[in-house]
Amino acid sequence: MINTRDILETINMIQEENLDIRTITMGISLLDCADSDIDKSCSKIYDKICKKAEKLVKTGEDIEKEYGIPIINKRISVTPIAMVSAASGGDPVKYAKILDKAAKTVGVNFLGGYSALVQKGFAAGDERLIRSIPEALAETDRICSSVNIGSTKAGINMDAVRLMGQIVKESAEKTRDKGLVGPSKLVVFCNAPDDNPFMAGAFHGAGEPDCVINVGVSGPGVVRAAVSKIPDADITEVADTVKKTAFKITRMGQLVAKEASKRLGVPFGIVDLSLAPTPAVGDSVAHILEEMGLEQCGACGTTACLALLNDAVKKGGVMASSHVGGLSGAFIPVSEDAGMIDAARNQVLSIEKLEAMTAVCSVGLDMIAIPGDTPAEVIAAIIADEAAIGMVNSKTTAVRVIPAIGKKDGEEIEFGGLFGVSPIMKVNTASPAKFISRGGRIPAPLQSLKN
């Protein structure tokens, strides 16, 4: 039974604490669009996306108006394009351009899935697509790209790691006059989930239905406000408060997901519980950690606080929805979180501390600006380190770093909009070149043998 107090509490969360649905993402399978003729394949892709997602944006807007719940983004994820392009053998950038055209036609903010899954090696079309990523991201506006280079079951493909170090660097060079949008829309994963609704890493996995609706909730401001009301509570009560708050946030996400599913005639997939921050004041994961008792995010104790937060969010969210998936936890993107930005400016937060934090939270080293002259092999080694954390701990980790061409550590770069601003963080440049050049595959850990 819904009572007046619950209604007023939700209204206050939306108006005062930045509560929103961060994204409704429609996943669309393109496996039936593969064709030996690339032009026919592209035509099939455009027609299918426009048919399936024709009413996606309007449906999201209608739900916003009727329920008073802000839905910030309407997005699409598609089958990893490397799988589709393998049949044609043509220039993969053609696929990027037709996907961009389809995204604009239906009016979504972003379309994810210009992707390849190469954790165990390169299949037909994989390497060709990966090498096309810098050009594809430079020549499109709404396309996002991801590459999965490792998993707990397969180990880490070090040939792919080496290649991705080069691709990240090249993406920055190709978009240096476009605000470095290339690397900001490129994620390198270990253990990438098939049902992630959040960009830039979203794609529609091969085991997913033909079409599905996934929803990503948010609400760092709500969690911070809840914790601020118990300044003298012990840690057990803090965890319990976060858990109860996550339950309320997720129930709202479940409502929106089911309503969108019903109106669009598309199966409901999952709710992603992730606390996704923005540069807006009061919408920061770092500020939640500081509310727990840290002077600033990055201080000793940060990893412990983040572990508590991530665990409590998952426990509360799982009780609120039958189908939880995606990444589900807490994001720590530096440029998109006001508290992270301040901590990095004050040099309290370093890349090394962020790496430690990724062992206990969702995703990984996210939206971090690094000096533009950082060598490709150092970027590759950052990717390898982060993938190792994910592989050994059986969790998703990722790297989205932005080489700030022409800038050095200590300076800042403005991305604008949701991407915010980022201090350029210092990187250890002691050379890992020989390690990265060896290639091969890091074997899967013992915990992969669970059959």
Image (tube, rainbow, N blue to C red):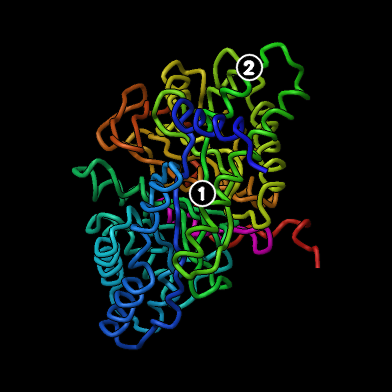
Tag 2 residue: 229
**Residue 35: mark:** none
> Can residue 142 be seen by looking at this rendering?
yes
Report whether 350 appears left or right of 444: left
Given residues 154 and 216, the one toward you in this image is: 216
Give the Cα distance between marks 2 and 1.
26 Å
Vertically, is 143 above or below 364?
below
Give the answer, above or below, for where 240 lies relative to 170.
Answer: above
Image point 24% across, 58% down: which residue? 140
Instruction: Determine whether 108 is above or below 91 in the image.
Output: above
Label 2 sits on a secondary structure element that is: loop
Residue at 27 percent across and 38 percent down: it is 405
As drawn, the residue found furthest toward the bottom would be 36
Asked which quadrant contains residue 275, the reply is top right
* C-beta proximity under 8 Å, tags 2 and 1: no
Q: Amino acid at mark 2?
A: Lys
Total number of numbered discs in the rendering:
2
Magenta stretch: includes residue 1:
no
Circle 1 — which element? Answer: strand
Return the residue at label 1.
216
Q: Residue furthest left?
A: 177
Residue, x 43% and y 83% (percent of image)?
32
Amino acid tagged 1: Gly
Name the one closer to the observer, 363 or 216.
216
Give the quarter of the figure containing the C terminus.
bottom right
Give the magenta part as a residue range.
147-166
Horizontal and vertical percent position of residue 296 = 55, 16
Looking at the image, residue 443 sits to the left or right of residue 333; the answer is right
Q: Is residue 163 magenta?
A: yes
